[in-house]
Amino acid sequence: MSVSTGTDGIKDVHTPLSDADVQTLKAGDRVRISGVIYTARDAAHGRLFPLIERGEPLPIDVKGQIIYYTGPSPARPGTVIGSVGPTTASRMDKFTPALLALGLKGTIGKGYRGQPVKEALRQHTGVYFGSIGGAGAVLSEFVKKAEVVAYEDLGTEAIRRLEVADFPAIVLYDCHGGDLYQDGQKVYAREDTK
Amino acid sequence: MREIHVSAIADGVKKLCMEANWNLEPDMLRAFDRALGTERSAAGKQVLTILKQNAELARTRQIPYCQDTGMVICFVDLGQDVHVTGGGLYAAINEGVSQGYKEGYLRASIVRSPFDRVNTGDNTPAVIHVDVVPGATLKIMLMAKGGGCENRSKYTMLTPAAGLPGVKDFIIECVKTAGPDACPPLILGVGVGGTFEKAAILSKKALFRELGSPNPDPTLDTLEQELLARANRLGIGPQGYGGDTTSFGVHILTYPCHITSLPVAVTIECHAHRHKEVTL
């Protein structure tokens, strides 16, 4: 198993993930992610998608992996990476079901996803994690190694292989239909403001 | 006539770009503290605490608070007795942006065309608004505007019959649809009146007022407080995890408008509200 619960109640998640691992994760779970994750955002997805449609191999094997939707700022000399917080995930919704069908197990981003992504998470046993948008400086502390593995010409939008240790995140959507946004917001909504 | 050389303008803009991205302004830090005192959600409090740590880390390491270091927006008050020498004002501002983003290890996030999407490599060009004003100084108000929240900004043309209730409902609807995508707690810049483009420009300019300061117009100030309270009853909370702090503030600017029109623009700004100004 690549998921275990720490004494502090936070779940430790080690990549790559299996279906059984993903099934243990529930919306609202706080997690620490360790291992390899890949960055990809709009432009990289735009290049991956035609390859998937044509049935051609991708520059990275997504099976069991996690894609982090981010475009880091440049690293200062002597550092691993610059600020590296999440970007809005819904812009990648068009591409996510196809990647989940290829065996991708998780994505990290921020914000709501569309219904087709929620259904694909169920169908292919995937999980959508959230990291804190705008906390890019803090999040850079958990990245131990970073290298561009595809589409270097895209600059910040290139696909990077990151080695992370205890990268903090929360389960936003699980593979059972759980949704942290819905659960969390209804507790604090004081009235219908329509 | 007072002469200001373009090198002084470029240098000023360069510093604003770096400092805005590394050092969150005191009005934002105070907003985090105020919210920590009122937020009931444990998850929301944790987000606010991490964001404060993030601001401190960014400041001490001179790295950007958020990796999205934004599109640069400049509002320039150009004194009519100023003569800009050595080149063009717009080119000088863009030179400052280019230098600031390259030397400050800030992300290049601008593509040269909305269609071919090729990155310009130095975050230029900026969006520049110039007002000619009395006097012999040149004031530059600069914002590094994040894309995620900008994408949730909205405009509508209401009928005069829709009136104030229609304006209020539209603003609250914008907060709802922005949700977690725009990185709440949000600041809402609102422009009401003028024309299609005037309302949009006002909605940006409104964001430059110090957060937490009252609107100089008492009627608008009351309206802002009402809308802020209403936004914070939505339950969206910090990062959308649920909570009481969905917005830090609502800033409204108005302008006269046509008898047929009631234009309303809302610029959604995230908690990475990076704004600085300099007067030359």
Image (cartoon, coloured by chain):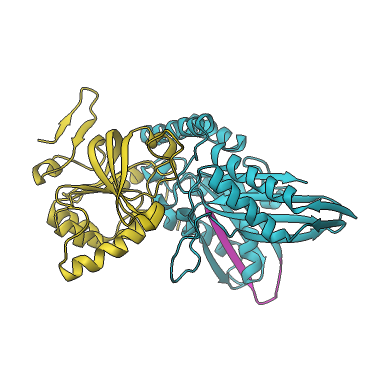
**B253 w.r.t. A20: above or below:** below
Any part of residue B221 in sight: no
Magenta part, dominant SS: strand
Label count reads 0
The structure residue drawn at horizontal position 16% and vertical position 61%, both measured from the top left corner, is A57
Asked if residue B224 lies left or right of residue A79, the reply is right
Viewer-closest of B231 and B189 = B189
Q: Choose top left, top right, bottom left or bottom right for residue B19.
A: top right
Q: Tell me which segment is drawn in magenta.
A: B256-269
Determine if the magenta segment contains residue B262. yes
Give x and y (percent) for residue B42: 37, 32
Position above or below: A129 against A51: above
The chain assigned the colour yellow in the figure is A
Residue found at x 46% / y 30%: B53
What x and y, as percent, mark residue B213? Answer: 67, 41
**Residue B58 in sight in this render:** yes
Residue B232 x %, y % = 48, 45
Q: In the figure, the cyan chain has which letter?
A: B
